[in-house]
Image (cartoon, rainbow, N blue to C red):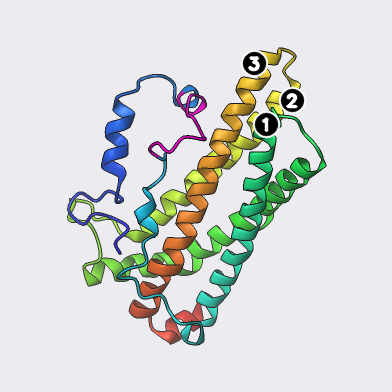
Amino acid sequence: MKIIDTTTGKRIGQETREQNRKLKEEDPIIRNADKNADSEGVSPMDPPEAYNVQGMHPVAETDRHPLIALYMKEHVAALAVTDGFEKAVNAFKESGYRLNDEVNDGFRAFFDFFDSSLLDHNRREEAQLFGLLHQRLLESGEHSDSPNPTTAVDVMEDDHVKFIQLGALAFNLLGLAARLPDHGSRMFTYGVACDNARELIELLRLHLFREDNVLFPLAQKLIGREELDRM
């Protein structure tokens, strides 16, 4: 499975989403608020077939380098917290945006983990692994054919930036909504916050899936064990 199209340099599925975005010229925050989260329409993220494992060759647990194994172990923790966050977001929306202990605990656990663990995990990936892996991907031909070749590492780093943007937006909108005196404005803002939270959840899951099943196997294939030991 490839993360990017080697001809266009764009991530798989991006062109279709760009065409859809051109059909709507209004503010992207308002666009998110207008989505029907319960529908089966086009996801703001990659299509479901992005999770197809056919053709992938994930590294067996017994063959994983300790650094890769650590990253993947942290992914398991991130997914568990993300699952709890999704349940809290869904419960919050279904209750008509009424806060309770369960919702508060789910929100608090996720944003605490996001700030203290996930961002640190992403920084370590970038500092320890991504630089050399990007170089090896370019050398091995695993890149786009664009004038400025891009690799799977570029896609992952792009996701890291989007995590920060969506996390900050969801968190700040939740805080803002609670302070708005007008009921209609408060409900609208909560809706936008939940839509951005859902987009963050989908992006996180797909990102971790691609790292575990595509990026990390490439890292172990293209980077020697001694080099990984030094990271």
Q: Which residues are magenta?
A: 31-42
| Image quarter of the N terminus | bottom left
Question: Residue 60, relative to residue 76: is it above or below?
Answer: below
* Residue assigned mark 2: 178
Q: Quadrant of residue 15?
A: top left
Q: Are circles 1 and 2 on residues that touch, CB within 8 Å?
A: yes
Task: Say few, some or many: other residues with alpha carbon within 10 Å of mark 3 (under 14 / 14 to 19 / 20 or more).
Answer: few
Q: Is residue 185 magenta?
A: no
Q: Residue at x 57, y 28 (%)?
A: 192
Task: Say few, some or many: other residues with alpha carbon within 10 Å of mark 2 (under 14 / 14 to 19 / 20 or more).
Answer: some
- Which secondary structure type mostly characterizes the magenta part of the structure? loop
Q: Secondary structure at mark 1?
A: helix
Q: Earlier in the sequence, mark 2 or mark 3?
A: 2
**Percent of width and height locating residue 13:** 30, 47
Q: Residue at x 46, y 68 (%)?
A: 212
Residue 185, labelled with which disc?
3
Q: Are circles 1 and 3 on residues that touch, CB within 8 Å?
A: no
Question: Residue 15, relative to residue 25: is it above or below?
Answer: below
* Separation of residues labelled 1 and 3 (CA atoms): 12 Å
* Separation of residues labelled 2 and 3 (CA atoms): 10 Å
Question: Residue 156, relative to residue 168: is it above or below?
Answer: below
Task: Say few, some or many: other residues with alpha carbon within 10 Å of mark 1 (under 14 / 14 to 19 / 20 or more).
Answer: many
Please tell me which residue lies in front, 72 or 32.
32
> Label 2 sits on what residue type?
Ala
**Percent of width and height locating residue 84:** 67, 52
Please tell me which residue lies in front, 38 or 203.
38
* Residue assigned mark 1: 174
> Label 3 sits on what residue type?
Ser
